[in-house]
Every structure is written in C-alpha cells, then in structure tokens.
Image: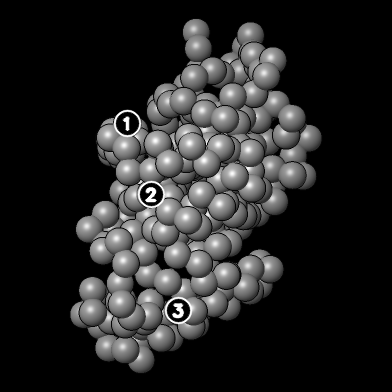
Amino acid sequence: MSASSLMTLAGPGGNAEAVPGFDRGMNVDIWSDLACPWCFIGTERFHQALADFEGRDDVRVIWHSYQLDPNLPEHFEGSEIDYLTESKGMPRDQIEAMTEQVAGVAAADGLQFDYANLKVANSRLAHHLVHLAQLRGVATEVNRALFAAHFEHGEDIADKDVLTRIGTEHGLSADEIGEALGSEQYDTAMRSDTDQAKGIGINGVPFFVVDGRFGVSGAQPVDTFAKALTLALEDAPEGGGCCGGSCCG
C-alpha cells in the first residue's frame, strides 16, 4: 500500500446504518457520487475486500453523498458522450477513448458498463433515496442497485418511478420514498456530507475512511482496501473500536 493511497486522518462522524445490537467494531465511511464510474468501481472493490475480511461482521458502512456535478440537468437529451464533450470542452474522440478505457477497467472487475445506453441524470434524488435507505439499514444494497441501474442497465436514476421501484425492492415503502425524494431534509443531509468531506480535505471521490483514522482515496485495488481494514483491526485503540464514525475515548 503506497503512501498516496492510504493516509491517517481524524474521524468524520456521521450517521451509520442501523445494525441491531451493534455496539462494537469499526465504521467505514464512504463518500461517493452515484453518477461517478470510478465510485462504482471503487466501492465494488471495497465490497470484495470486505467480503474476505475476517472481521467483516463487525464492520458498519456509513454512506455519504458527494455530488461531483450538482448543476447537471435533471435530464439531458443526449448521450453521455454528448454531455461530456459539451461540458468538458474536449474533442469527441478523446471523450470516447476515455469512456472506453473506464469501461475496460470496469469489465476487468466484472462490471458491464453500457455507455451507449447510459442516461445522463442528476444524482440528487438518488442520493436522497440512499439517505432514506441508510435510516432503514439497507443503504449498501440500494447503493449497489443504483450504480448497476445507471451504468449497466441504462436506467434513469433521476426518474422517481425508477427510484421507487429500486427502493421498494429493498424493503422501503413507496410512501416514505415519495416523501424523501426532493425533500429539504435530504438536501440538508447532502450539504452536511459535502461539508464534512471538505472539513477533512476530501476533494474527489470515491473516498473511504476506515475506522475513523485511515483514509483511502480513489478506486484502489482490492488489496489496498484489504490492507486498510487489516491495519485498522490490528492497530485498534486499546479498549475497543470506534463509534459514530470517529474513535470514542
């Protein structure tokens, strides 16, 4: 693990997924954007590392919103290539090469990105759904479903019907989803997440804070996440783990 991929920092705090009986172990805080391909790749690599981690049953994942392009239109009439060419001011062939490279990396990790059918959409409402899912203890499952819907299945993650279907498939009620989507409560929660990120020096996603002490930036290899988890376990403060996203005294 290189110094550039792992750093020591102060705990961010945050609201964790509800885990019945959970009173020990470590928290992993993850900042990501549901419209970010590297966030999908990076979080899937983290999930793979976590699945093989001996202390996985004592790990609690806390999801944080970080919109890379909050001014993205709710719906864009055009392809991802069209949007990136227009917004970045880069030649179309260069954008196509970039997306092909990202899709190739994703494919090597078993993810089937479909840029030809990807629907450009503002991720704000999708983040609202994740915040609701976090209160119900299913944020990880909803996150993964949203990433797959956007990047692999060509679904519109700004469409309330799509979001309602994904939420209800993971145990949320249609009524509570309807109240959550577009609410000021979750806009405030998103702003709070972004402020937290800025407070600990995060300026890009994905970003992972393991046990409130170790930061991992970017879509690092599975082995990097595995080493970070192991280091946090072996170097845990005397007397136990952490709570509330940062180590308790």
Q: Determine which of the numbered discs, if any, sits on residue 99 in the image.
A: 3
For mark 1, give the secondary structure: helix
For mark 2, give the secondary structure: helix
Q: Determine which of the numbered discs, if any, sits on residue 104 in the image.
A: none
Q: Residues within 10 Å of mark 2 (few under 14, many from 20)?
A: many
Is residue 220 visible in the rendered image? The answer is: no
Identify the residue shown where x is 22% and y is 58%.
71
Q: Is residue 2 above or below residue 171?
A: below
* Front-lying residue, 236 or 207: 207
- The residue singled out by tag 2 in the image is 125
For mark 3, give the secondary structure: helix
* Quarter of the figure with residue 74: bottom left
Q: Position of residue 220 (x, y in %)?
A: 55, 56
- The residue singled out by tag 1 in the image is 185
Identify the residue shown where x is 60% and y is 31%.
137
Asked if residue 195 lies left or right of residue 214, the reply is left
* Front-lying residue, 86 or 31: 86
